[in-house]
Structure formats: structure tokens, C-alpha cells
Image (cartoon, helix red, strand yellow):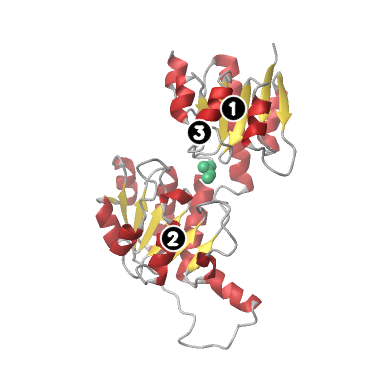
């Protein structure tokens, strides 16, 4: 019997073409808005597999309704939108797309760091607002990054790429904090493992690259920001709920830290009147870390291959819960 695959939105053709070459029946959601959860459930009920992404809510409720699904393939490296424990209980393998976007996301972290250090987004707005002014030798000043200390929270695939950029461009010292030590990265980057408090105390730039879990949720809160240097730049390209957004705004206003660059906010989308958007040392992007043609094409290929390999030989090359395939 042909397998029906529900494709939750329009993903790059590279991956879809691979699925089309197989003997699958694809239903692609073509509307210019994502499905609501109810729509997703109703559609998924008549399909064998689902190709979805980070804003599709694959929670316990969804999984209870759709426990018949044979595989869920997520077009993203993060999977905090999916109740992995429930999926595993129901025996549903969850595929994901690691590494495809590491370069692209590290570029966004690196770019935000420079943009904040030089107030780029704010200065762009001054021109739009007719406030170019004049060449003022003591005005519009930023800071330099050479020889500063980069603290990485979550030194995995993307964190390593960010650290390499900072080391090569600015000879930055690398310190990091992880759940488990990354000895390979320590050797590669001459990076030092530090406790969380030391990461806060010593970083000139602190860049977040961890997964969102109950342990990392709102870990960057008022008390964390108060421990940081008043000159520090906080970068988050991982997930918005890892920082406490009001505490972050307060920390910048109070001078606890210099500024922030965010590719992720909480909630998403960010409200257009959020005070952070009007601050001088703040640069915010609408969650585009993986948004390059190369990364998105590769993500679509990995997401498609997870489904294809599952149906051809019960292997999922990039799987979050491999235990379900063992049973
Ligand atoms: C993007 O945020 C991803 O998780 O791939």
C-alpha cells in the first residue's frame, strides 16, 4: 500500500523531489499560513507520516490523536515543539535535521555580535528617521571585539562554528559551559570549560547555542544578567524561552549589560512595540538562523531522507529517539 505523507507547509523542492520520486502520496499544505493544530490533527489522521517543522505543535494532545503515525520527520535541528517522551511511548520515530544549518546559524550569531557592538540596526533607523546628523567624533560609538572573551552556552555543532569565526576574526579566547564537556572542541578551539557563573562573570560576548529544555528555560534571567559585565553582549540564536525577555530589557536599561542580539524571541513573533526594538544596543531578527538557500535545501533533503530510509529499510539517519527502532 502506498504511504500517505502529510507535508505541513511548502519546504524546498530539493527534499520534496526526493519524496516524489518514491512511491509516496504527498499532501502538501499550500496555504500562505501554517495549519492550526486542529487542522494538523485532522489532516494527520488520514496520513501515515508527517513532515513538519518547529512551529507545528506536536504535543501530547496531538500525539494522542495521531498515535497511528509511523514516522514524524522534523525540518529543524531543534525539536522542543515535539513531546519526545510521548512520541517514544507511542513508538513513533522522530527524525530531525542536525548540522545542515550550523554555518548559516553561526553566521547570524556572528553578524548579530558585530551589529550590536556597532549599534548597526539602531543607526540604520536614525537615517530612516532623518537623524543622520553630522560627523561627531564622540558620537555613535561602538566597541571592538579583538582579543575579547567569547562565552558559549552550549558548545555543540553551531557553538563550535561561532567560536571558530570569533577566534579567526578577532583572536577571541573561548570559554564555554555545557551539560557534558566537549573535549574535541576544547582541543580544536583551545576552549576552557567553566561553571555557569564563571561564564556569566567572564564573557565579553555570551552566545547561546543550547537546546531548549526544562534545565535551560529562562536560565538567562535577572540574576544571571546581573552577574555579567556591564560591557557584555548577549546573543541568542537558539530558542527565545532560554532568556527571560523582560529581565533582558531591564538588564540593558539598568546598564547590567551593554546590549543584545537576538534571532529568537519569546513569544514569536515579537510584538512590534516591544521596548527592546527601540533600544540603541539591540539588534533583533525574526528567527532566520537557518535561512540560507544552502541550509534550507539541505534541511529538506535530510528531512526527506529520514522518511525514505525509514520506509525502505527501517533506518532513520538522523533520529531523536533511536530506541523506538530497536524494539
Ligand atoms: C531552527 O531554529 C531549527 O531548530 O532548525
Q: Is mark 1 within 8 Å of ligand 1?
A: no
On screen, residue 284 above or below 31: below
- Which of the two marks, 3 or 1, is nearer to us in this view? 3
Q: Position of residue 2 (x, y in %)?
A: 70, 15
User: In the image, 178: left or right of 36?
Assistant: left
Q: Give the Cα distance between marks 3 and 2.
A: 26 Å
Precedes in sequence: disc 1 or disc 2: 2
Residue under label 1: 305
Precedes in sequence: disc 3 or disc 2: 3
Residue under the point 38% across and 41% down: 214
Q: Residues within 10 Å of mark 2 (few under 14, many from 20)?
A: some
Residue under the point 72% across and 28% down: 27
Residue under label 3: 82
Q: Count the labels in the image.
A: 3
The quarter of the picture where the N terminus appears is top right
**For the residue labelled by badge 1, is the local secondary structure a helix, a strand or a loop?**
helix
Q: Residues within 10 Å of mark 1 (few under 14, many from 20)?
A: many
**For the residue labelled by badge 2, is the local secondary structure a helix, a strand or a loop?**
helix
Decide if residue 258 is in sight here: yes
Q: Nearer the viewer, residue 6 or 36?
A: 36
Residue under label 2: 246
**For the residue labelled by badge 3, is the local secondary structure a helix, a strand or a loop?**
loop
Q: Position of residue 13 (x, y in %)?
A: 70, 36
The quarter of the picture where the C terminus appears is top left
Q: Give the Cα distance between marks 3 and 1.
A: 20 Å
Q: Residues within 10 Å of mark 3 (few under 14, many from 20)?
A: many
Decide if residue 145 is in sight here: no
Amino acid at each position: 500500500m502506498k504511504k500517505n505523507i502529510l507535508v505541513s507547509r511548502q519546504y524546498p523542492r530539493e527534499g520534496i523531489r526526493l519524496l516524489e520520486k518514491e512511491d509516496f502520496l504527498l499532501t502538501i499544505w499550500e496555504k500562505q499560513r501554517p495549519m492550526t493544530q486542529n487542522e494538523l490533527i485532522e489532516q494527520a489522521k488520514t496520513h501515515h507520516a508527517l513532515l513538519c517543522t518547529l512551529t507545528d505543535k506536536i504535543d501530547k494532545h496531538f500525539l494522542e490523536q495521531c498515535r497511528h503515525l509511523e514516522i514524524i520527520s522534523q525540518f529543524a535541528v531543534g525539536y522542543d515543539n515535539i513531546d519526545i517522551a510521548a512520541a517514544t511511548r507511542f513508538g513513533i520515530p522522530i527524525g530531525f535535521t542536525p548540522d545542515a544549518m550550523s554555518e548559516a546559524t553561526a553566521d547570524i550569531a556572528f553578524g548579530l555580535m558585530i551589529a550590536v557592538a556597532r549599534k548597526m540596526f539602531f543607526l540604520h533607523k536614525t537615517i530612516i528617521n532623518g537623524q543622520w546628523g553630522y560627523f561627531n567624533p564622540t558620537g555613535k560609538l561602538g566597541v571592538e571585539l579583538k582579543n575579547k572573551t567569547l562565552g558559549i552556552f552550549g558548545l555543540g555543532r553551531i557553538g563550535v562554528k561561532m567560536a571558530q569565526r570569533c577566534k579567526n576574526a578577532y583572536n577571541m579566547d573561548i570559554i564555554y559551559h555545557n551539560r557534558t564537556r566537549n573535549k574535541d572542541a576544547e582541543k580544536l578551539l583551545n576552549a576552557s570549560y567553566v561553571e555557569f557563573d564563571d561564564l556569566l562573570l567572564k564573557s565579553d560576548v555570551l552566545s547561546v547555542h543550547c537546546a531548549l529544555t526544562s534545565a535551560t528555560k529562562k536560565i538567562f534571567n535577572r540574576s544571571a544578567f546581573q552577574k555579567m559585565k556591564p560591557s557584555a553582549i548577549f546573543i541568542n540564536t537558539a530558542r527565545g524561552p532560554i532568556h527571560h525577555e523582560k529581565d533582558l530589557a531591564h538588564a540593558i536599561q539598568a546598564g547590567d549589560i551593554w546590549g543584545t542580539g537576538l534571532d529568537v524571541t519569546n513569544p514569536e513573533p515579537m510584538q512590534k512595540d516591544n521596548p527592546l526594538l527601540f533600544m540603541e544596543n539591540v539588534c533583533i531578527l525574526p528567527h532566520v538562523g537557518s535561512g540560507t538557500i544552502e541550509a534550507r535545501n539541505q534541511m529538506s533533503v535530510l528531512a526527506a531522507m529520514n522518511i525514505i530510509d525509514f520506509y525502505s529499510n527501517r533506518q532513520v539517519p538522523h533520529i531523536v529517539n533511536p530506541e523506538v527502532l530497536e524494539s
